[in-house]
Image (spheres, helix red, strand yellow):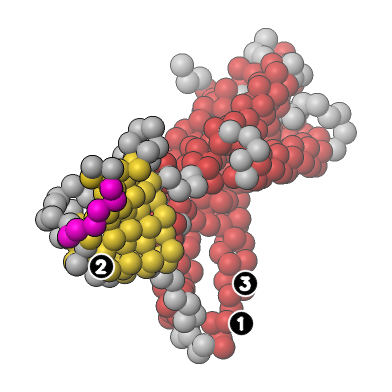
Amino acid sequence: MITILDRYLMRQFLPIFVVAAGMFMTLVSLIDLFANLVRYLNYEVSFQQIFQVSLFYLPKSFSYAMPVSLLFAAAYTLGDLYGRNELTSIFSSGIPFWRFSMSLVFMGLLASIFSFYFDDVVVIPTLKKKNDLSRTLLRQQRTENNSDIVIKAMNGQLIYSVDFYDRTGQILNGVSIVEQNPRGEFISLIRSPQAVWNGEHWLFSNAVIYQWEDGLLRVGPLPETDRYREQPDAFRRSAVNVEELSARDAGLLVKDLKNAGLPFIEAQADYYHRFSFATASLVVMILSISMGGRFRKNILLMSLLASLGSAVIFYVMEMISMMMARLGYIPPFIGAWFPVGAFIVIGALMLRSAKT
């Protein structure tokens, strides 16, 4: 149930959050702009095009700025209330600090939910447009054609070896397909100079097949077949940037990499991190609130410093755990969610024992 105190706290909190979000969002956008400004000038990119790139980056800037803005606004609001001795009368009325701050925790939870869908629907498409436009302006070409590709299909019973994949024409050049039974015993080998995707399956040209017959390895032309239906995307997945995929597509990417027998640990860690990073708003809000009331002097300054310090520790721990997960030292799920779970528990315990 929303009380008068909850509404009063929100009226104190929201204006500070809006100002902080605008300030941090501008700062993040300027950092990205100045990081590429010299190259833009070298390639004589117009001001209008630079402005367009920066405009596409604004949603990502807001995504980065939101957790920090929530932390700053919560710490500043509570510190200001402590400094004006307004919380003394609230505590005197018998309202515990954890109950008084529940509206801020709820705000952090809403921000986390919003952050996930905002990233999925708005940030990812605009970030892809920004990256594509920036690469075009800076003459940076990124190809999705792959060479020397080896993938597995049908639980490893089919092994594709491709010299080069042409994404534009969806053509495999220099194709070899080894088929084996579940025990790993050789069944056949198909070799073809080229295979073209017709929308449903691969069409081989001048293909030959080697297979055992009566104890002898015989070779002959490959009969026309529609058996080989591995999607063309399986041969280019290594060129896909997970940050430019929605959560659903990132999940499909991990599945494709697994089915193709390609390294998938890094992509899986990034996929889980897509969900865990959205909870950063809730984590930093709990940390910020739990620091309130723990200082007797310079309350506002010390609350801000303690909140920022704990948030830095959280982000450093998250960075280390994600690095270990991408390298395969720990499971991807643990790498993405351990810092979140640990800091939520620590923050909840500190919030429960806060001054009241």
Looking at numbered disc 3 in the image, what kind of residue is underneath it?
Ala
Image position of 39 with respect to 156: above or below: below
> Which quadrant of the figure has residue 165?
bottom left
Image position of 20 with respect to 129: above or below: above
Queried whether the magenta region covers residue 293, the answer comes back as no
What quarter of the picture does the C terminus occupy?
top right
Image position of 29 with respect to 347: above or below: below
Looking at numbered disc 1 in the image, what kind of residue is underneath it?
Val
Q: Which mark is residue 194?
A: 2
Q: Which mark is residue 38?
A: 1
Q: Residue furthest left?
A: 224
Residue 131: where, in percent of width, then height? 45, 67
Q: Residue at x 50, y 38 (%)?
A: 272
Give the structural element (helix, strand or loop) at label 1.
helix
Residue 121: where, in percent of width, then height? 36, 48
Q: In this orientation, does residue 270 appear?
A: no
Residue underneath mark 3: 35
The overriding secondary structure of the stretch rendered in magenta is strand
